[in-house]
Image (tube, coloured by chain):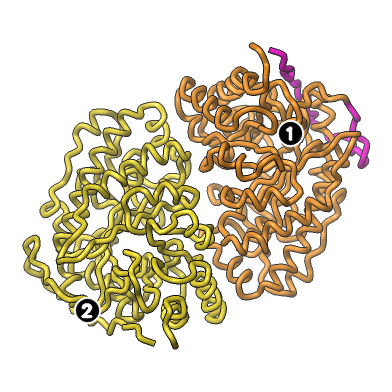
Chain colours: A orange, B yellow
Amino acid sequence: MCRKRPTVVSCTAKPTSQPRLAPGTHLVTELENDTLLRALLRRRVDYTPVWIMRQAGRYLPEYRATRARAGNFMDLCRNPELACEVTLQPLNRFPLDAAILFSDILTIPDAMGLGLYFSEGEGPGLERPIRDAADVRQLAVPDMEDELGYVMDAVGMIRRELAGQVPLIGFSGSPWTLAVYMVEGGGTKSFARSKAMLFDRPELMHALLAKLSVAVIAYLNAQVARGAQALMIFDTWGGVLTPYAYREFSLAYMTRIIAGLTREAEGRRVPVILFTKGGGQWLDRMADSGCDALGVDWTLDLADARRLVGDRVALQGNLDPSILHASPERIRAEVGRVLASYGPSPGHVFNLGHGIHPDVDPDHAAVLVEAVHTLSPAFHGATQ
Amino acid sequence: MCRKRPTVVSCTAKPTSQPRLAPGTHLVTELENDTLLRALLRRRVDYTPVWIMRQAGRYLPEYRATRARAGNFMDLCRNPELACEVTLQPLNRFPLDAAILFSDILTIPDAMGLGLYFSEGEGPGLERPIRDAADVRQLAVPDMEDELGYVMDAVGMIRRELAGQVPLIGFSGSPWTLAVYMVEGGGTKSFARSKAMLFDRPELMHALLAKLSVAVIAYLNAQVARGAQALMIFDTWGGVLTPYAYREFSLAYMTRIIAGLTREAEGRRVPVILFTKGGGQWLDRMADSGCDALGVDWTLDLADARRLVGDRVALQGNLDPSILHASPERIRAEVGRVLASYGPSPGHVFNLGHGIHPDVDPDHAAVLVEAVHTLSPAFHGATQ
């Protein structure tokens, strides 16, 4: 077997404040393990790379310890040293093929002055939601090195600590997803306000989405400038729309964003992954957005998904996160099923179909990663 | 325009207890409006029939008044007079083309002795969830005229009060959906226990589903015996499964149930509607279950859904419930879009893609019903 495994990353988060790095000053390093980037670009790899959505999170006791030390959730996000520390924690446990920036999806609305807060057990909320045209007019695209400098500092710090072992994925919420939170003022089950605006005041919703798109482009490009080597757009709420509304109010803006992104840095292509939760039925359209890869949840067979997108994009997914509650034998069997359903190279990045559950045993995540690395070389023409 | 509209139903629920009707003693009546039944069987109709999932519910002030009078939610479900009263309330307001039995989805687990309760704002719970093989072994299929007699009495009473104006739809949860509640002990976001059982102890999950299937068949057939003229199976949680698990643990049992149902009563075919929430990607397979119609949520274009199922089944849906928060003009426009996307007859029953939201203005539901009745004759070859 000829795959390279990332070696253990030693996270040396400093208790005192780091000197801020100027934009563009991250280290240009050779990547020891570029399997993820190659797979996202549908190039030849020796095994299927794997990372886990929410891999830095509550299922890890060391995350809970750092979180307790930080104070509340946003204190953790706003502290680059601690954000760096939790980003690297899963890499110390598992030979993952990528790190992903630890941050919140609502940093942009917060930086736009809407006042992000977290109440225990209730999820995120925004103190000053968007209600009318005046609210939208007042929104300014935040300065990425000022209001959002803490995110960029975390990106730079993580890149330095990773020291080229695996690539770092940066991310943002999609404009529609951010708009839902901004209009509802928090989480929602009915989407009453955001959909009423979409249907009754489409021009106002478009104005909001256009402004958010400018901000998301700047946000993601700033992450690349500080060292992000791949980008992911999380469209958490695109799947609650009708097909027409999805195309007009979510996919169109993500397509616009992708066209505005820095697609090459440090002499390498920066792949973009698009993930619309519950959007499996629209993969065909999504594949034309200009992205390099599509995230797929577990309600679609990857063989069917692959038929839908042809050779236009790579696919990332799609193990049901609930399988991590099952036994190691069952986890291995289901990993094998996902690998077989994608079939031979190129273009598969292994992941869950959604974020890892907070109550999963970390040892079960280890089984998943090990199973992908052990079982996948057979799908890449390797002789074992 | 040659469509018949149901006339207003006068609900005369009695404050004192009704004499219980013996099975099979409902009135055999001619239906004044059989548009729903004809459309479900893909026969010719003059306009598209419409009903609304959760049409008897919290968005109606008269429902809230009856509910307050009843005590808690299960007191309302267990009182045939009051269940009849709330079933008929929406028909007094809107010229709907069907009534649907007001009841809870968890009556079967409750009658099996699991102890259903409702806590304010938390949704339903079961006091004695299923944990092991002994729990499954102990489950007995309840007697439909004893433990579930209150449901059957409600069915008989509603049929009598409807007096043949529109058909009555009976319903049940799917075995998988009931099993999720029974194993989790209530609502869940992660499905940790039910999926762990599915993956690690499939034989135990199959034993539970087999027992539930027997109960659901008896439950639906008893509803038909008391007067239900169409049946709907709600597979609320089928959409959280992988395609493989869906076929093995949900669709297989619904197919078995449909094969066991009374399909003719009072000289008429009793159509069966299958609805898997979030199951749009599996319509092709679902169409072979033996059902007459499939419910479709709003994430699929009905034109695409129709292509998937061909002329095998009718389709029910699929307006986004959120559109009822928008203006009357917008509601009419979106109703027109759904009608046009299904296209010409036969085989469309108009509905929302999911239950009506509790905070919708009832006048907006009126706009929906009126728009379907006004705009749809054009799709049925009518000259206006």
Q: Are marks 1 and 2 on the same chain?
A: no
Disc 2 secondary structure class? loop
Percent coordinates x, y for residue A127 in the rendering: 66, 61
Percent coordinates x, y for residue B76 in the rendering: 25, 64
Residue at (87, 40) in percent of width and height: A264
State left or right for residue A349 relative to residue A29: left
Residue at (51, 69) in percent of width and height: B338
Give the CA distance from mark 1 to mark 2.
Answer: 65 Å
Camera-nearest label, 1 or 2: 1
Can you tell which mark lies on residue B146? none
State left or right for residue A283 relative to residue B360: right
Disc 1 secondary structure class? loop
Residue at (9, 60) in percent of width and height: B23
Q: Nearer the viewer, residue A34 or B154?
A: A34
Please name the amino acid that badge 1 sits on: Arg
- Total labels: the figure holds 2
Q: Mark 1 near mark 2, Cβ–Cβ under 8 Å?
A: no
Circle 2 chain: B
| A124 in magenta | no
Q: Quadrant of the N terminus of chain A?
A: top right
Q: Magenta segment, principal secondary structure?
A: loop
- Which residues are the magenta region? A1-29
Q: Nearer the viewer, residue B57 or A71?
A: B57
Circle 1 chain: A
Do we see residue A238 in this rendering?
Answer: yes
Please name the amino acid that badge 2 sits on: Cys
Percent coordinates x, y for residue A348 in the rendering: 66, 32
Can you tell which mark lies on residue A42? 1
Residue position marked by numbered label 2 in the rendering? B11
